[in-house]
Amino acid sequence: MAGMGTIRLLLLFLFVTSLQVAFGVTNSRDALALKSLISQWRDLPPSWNESTDPCDNQWDGIQCSEDGRVTSLLLPGIKIKGNISEDIMLLTELIFLDLASNPDLVGSLPESIGKLQKLQRLTLQGCNLTGTIPTTIENLKNLNFLALNSNQFSGSIPSTIGSLVNLTWLDLADNQLTGPLPINPGLDSLVKTNHFHFNKNQLTGSISPALFSSKMNLIHMIFDNNNFTGPLPNRIMNLKSLQTLFLDFNKFDGTLNMGSSLGQDVKIVSIRDNNITDANISPTIKSISLLNNPLCKDAKHSNNLYCQNKQSNQPTYTTNRENCRPQVSCPDNQQLSPTSCTCAYPFSGQMVFRAPRFNDISNSNLFQQLEKTLWEQLIRASNSVYISNIVITDNKYIEATVALFPLSGLHFSIDDFIKLGFNLSNQEYKPPLEFRPYYFIQPPQFPGSGSKGTSISTAAIAGIAAVGCILLIALVVVAVYASKQRRKAREAAVLANPFVSWGSAGEDDGTAPQLRGTKCFSFEELKKCTGNFSDKNEIGAGGYGKVYIGYLTNGLVVAIKRAQQGSMQGAQEFKNEIELLSRVHHKNLVSLVGFCYEQGEQMLVYEYISKGTLRENILGKGGKYLDWKMRLQIALGSARGLAYLHELADPPIIHRDIKSTNILLDENFNAKVADFGLSKLIADTQKGHVSTQVKGTPGYLDPEYYMTQQLSEKSDVYSFGVVMLELATARLPIEKGTYIVSEVKKVIDQYDQEYYGLREKMDPKIVNQAKNVGLRKFVQLALECVHDSAVHRPSMNEVVKEIEIILENDVSTRTTNLYYSDDSTNASNLELSRHPYSDDDPILRDTSNAFDSSSGYPYQTITYIEPK
């Protein structure tokens, strides 16, 4: 009978478990993305840890469609700590993304954000994000609200932002952005946008007249606290919808012309603290301030209202909390609620009004109206708002601390807390016109308890406890039984599938690798798709083993790298390598499709790259040769792949073996960087460099790295510079005892306008195409990359920008197609029988010191270790 009871309990347990699985509604792809975010973030709402089904169990801040797709991710101001994972791209149905006011949210905004093509609102204000604004933002065609203000974004504003033609709100204020405003294409394309906020940056240059097109629908334009120069264009009068224009604290000069044709709705124009020397202003424009400009020292203007300071900074406003008599003393972090005159935890923050239509903060009627709209729109209960600390800042904004109180209890639920943050950070709350536009700074705060909890009776608690005790006993019995069964199953599985016991040799903790879009293939799958690893499907070989072409059942063609017994790694090393490669996703990098780790095998599965190596194509594979423009495009693609590894991969990666045989070309001749066998995580380094054994390929090896054994990303830059010279000359880096870098430096002729002194060194196939300034700039950039000192080399991101400029300005190259060489005899004499995945490297045939990597593509690599 005891055995029968155990079986019944087991059946009950399995039934309950099956119900939980059956009722799960969240799309598996979205659930995977959210789990990835959880692994990157700390201090999430408790509901995220209470269940595994975000949609069915209503995780706080998550909203889903009927088919289980996540449509909203709203977590403003709840103390999130961590990075935004690249895996956020899996949330392809996301419409609203609001992570505002989380100052411990750091790192860069991933390029993969461009995959969220249904996104309508992206709100990341008040975080601590760094790096550049990704150009992939151009893919967010449905975006109508973009708030990236109050972060630490640097670099220029990407011109691709002009692709966001549905944008109505653009806020990039309070960052570290530099350079000019992008025009044509750029901001002038955003004809629907009515709010431009670029204040508190380091933007430079003059403001283009194109920004004042009659097609623009600008209502608020705030560019103060930058480094803009030059006169303001007369076309400013075209902005018929303009209500506020703030250009304070810049370097605008010359004469300001503001006639009577400016829109009738204009409320305030402030161009204080600039270098304006004269002005022609229509009397119909009343609210304009030119205080602290040179013209205000001239008798002609000094008595005009626009040169006077009329503001009042003495608030006399009192709120309804004054009705609480006598006032009580509240504990820490609690405040007196005006609704109940008791202590509670409010939802609070700082409202910043950037272009107020008044300058007298003692006007109590205005702030009473503000208070009223806050409780009407957000709390829907009178007297639930307390406004305090009203000040006018140095840049003439009005700031006020706003506290909203719950109708009952000590605090808002997490759900209500998130809704309040979303409404304020996404401009859903509409203040009185006199206070617009505004933004909301929400300090880190978090409700004291769960989000949707309701009171439970004592009887219910007792019943739950009783049921819990019964279930606990049942679970103990089931656990003992299941443990015995698991042990037997594990012992049998280990013999057939080492992946089940990933660290069975004690080298690892037994956990599976953390994969990102990478599949675990069975041995039988790969055996079948390669014809039982037949010789006819072998496409490369080396000390590590062999590479086969495979045809998966879904039609995908792959390259399968199969390690031989002598070259296999330990479980931990193989796992680390897979985790590293699975994190790398970029169109200019060879992608890891999957791996196999069973039946004593270690195999890596890559995408198949059909056109072979860059070296083969430079030499003229099959009689075809790359023209000059195609070489520039290949250089640009390779540079972008490397820049991604250095700056955007998570964690960043140093390649350590850049060379022309590790750059592959696909069917469209797009460059893809391959072979990460020697790669080093920048996260493993200290301040960008690490002491390590010198590894690389002769001719491409950074001499500073070789001498000091100090590896940095600038070592990759040096190797890439050698590849650039190889593109121009078609010469091997080391050839007949000469070094390509030295040979190029010898012949440089600054006075040779056509060839820069390189005519005799250049690849004859492009001599007549590249004789212009583009060649000069290209070679100069290459020589900067191969500078002896790493500190004088550009970053890969800077290299990308320079090659883009060269491509844009290169007027001599008129086609991106390949052309056929008439020199068929030359082509036939080239050693081109090697398949792109073979490591029979034509650059160096000496294999005595070969370093056989188990990752990437099987190109042979020389390992140098500095003599002791």
Image (tube, rainbow, N blue to C red):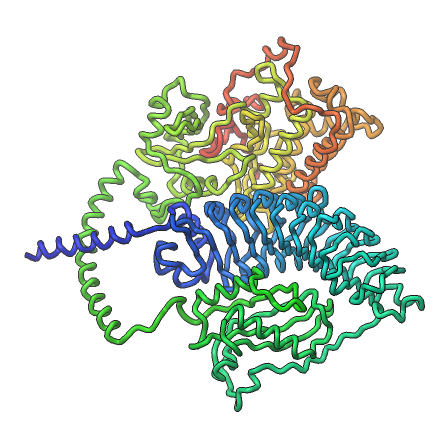
Residue 308 lies, in percent from the top left, at 83, 72
Q: What is the quadrant of the C terminus in the image? A: top right
> In this rendering, does residue 710 appear at all?
no
Q: Residue furthest top?
A: 825
The image quadrant where one finds the N terminus is bottom left
Residue furthest left as drawn: 1
Query: In this rendering, is residue 293 above or below 216?
Result: below
Q: Is residue 809 visible?
A: yes
Q: Residue at x 56, y 37 (%)?
A: 656
In the figure, residue 472 lies in which quadrant?
bottom left
Q: Residue at x 51, y 52 (%)?
A: 84
Residue 215 % position (x, y): 71, 48
User: Would you say 393 lies left or right of 585 here?
Assistant: right
Q: Closer to the camera, 868 or 562?
A: 562
Please state if 259 lies on the left or on the right of 161 as rendered.
Answer: right
Observer-nearest of 640 and 378: 378
Quadrant assignment, res 824:
top right
Q: How many marks?
A: 0
Q: Position of residue 680 (x, y in %)?
A: 53, 42
The front one of 698 and 646 is 646
Q: Quadrant of residue 361?
A: bottom right
Question: Is 726 placed above or below 106 here?
Answer: above
In the displayed structure image, the side of residue 94 where residue 617 appears, left or right? right
- Image coordinates of residue 81 in percent, x first then y, are 50, 60
Residue furthest to the right in view is 299
